[in-house]
Amino acid sequence: MAAHIERGTAFRRATMWTLNQIMEAGAMGVQITISGKLRGDRSAFEKHTQGILPRAGNYAKDIVSEDVTHTKTPMGLIGIKIRIARKEKVVPEFKLKGLSEQKLKTESEKLEQEMIVKTESEQIKIEEEKMKTLVTLEEEEQELK
């Protein structure tokens, strides 16, 4: 954007081009602030925002990147500040831990119940039943040979 302004492109046009490019690249939100001698003898600033851009809190620190640059024009220096909120770094506030823990507990309880065996013959019967349920590829291997 600074290169466009240095070459003489109107600052609003350069700003809109940059906003559209950033949003098309997959950003959640963008804010561009231009300050300095924009149109006349007096300095001014303009803010252009598109999308959602969090401004406060830890969430804003995590997903918002900020950069400042200065550009030399015939009128004087112009400052450009760009803030971009990325979608990739969105961290969910809440995670459902209860369901996965319950599944793990029920599976471990089943294993513990199976492990409790009174005699060796019962253990052999249980293992034989497990072997029947296992899917083996021995038949397919013999066919391929």
Image (spheres, helix red, strand yellow):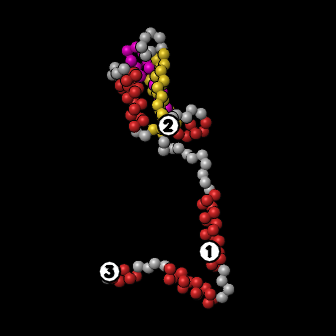
Name the magenta segment's main secondary structure. Answer: strand
Residue type pointed to by label 2: Ala
Q: The residue tagged with tag 1: helix, strand or loop? A: helix
Which residue is the site of mark 1? 111
Q: Earlier in the sequence, mark 2 or mark 1?
A: 2
Extreme residue in the bottom direction = 121
Where residue 42 appears, as percent x and y from the top left, is 47, 11
> Can you identify the residue that label 2 sits on?
85
| Contact check, label 1 and label 3, Cβ < 8 Å | no
Could you say whether the residue bearing mark 2 is in a helix, strand or loop? Answer: strand
Residue displayed at 50% across by 83% down: 132
Residue 1 appears in the figure: no
Residues at badges 2 and 1 in contact (C-beta under 8 Å)? no
The reply to whether callout 2 and callout 3 are in contact (CB within 8 Å) is no
Q: Give the range drawn in magenta.
A: 71-83
Q: Looking at the picture, how far across and down is residue 44, in whole percent?
A: 48, 16
Q: Which of 83 and 119 is in front in this view?
A: 119
| Residue visible at 50% across and 37% down in the picture | 85
Residue at mark 3: 144
Few, some or many residues within 10 Å of mark 2 (<14, 14–19, 20+): many
Q: What residue type is labelled 1?
A: Leu
- Residue 110 visible from this viewpoint: yes
Location of residue 103 in the rendering, given as x and y in whole percent from the top left corner: 60, 64
Mark pair 2, 3: CA separation? 56 Å
Mark 1 and mark 3: Cα distance apart in space: 36 Å
Between the C-alphas of marks 2 and 1, the distance is 47 Å
| Magenta-drawn stretch contains 23 | no
Which of the marked residues, 2 or 3, is nearer the chain's N terminus?
2
* Foreground: disc 2 or disc 1: 1
**Image location of residue 66, percent across then percent down:** 50, 33
Q: In this view, does 88 lie above or below 67?
A: below
Helix, strand or loop status at disc 3 = helix
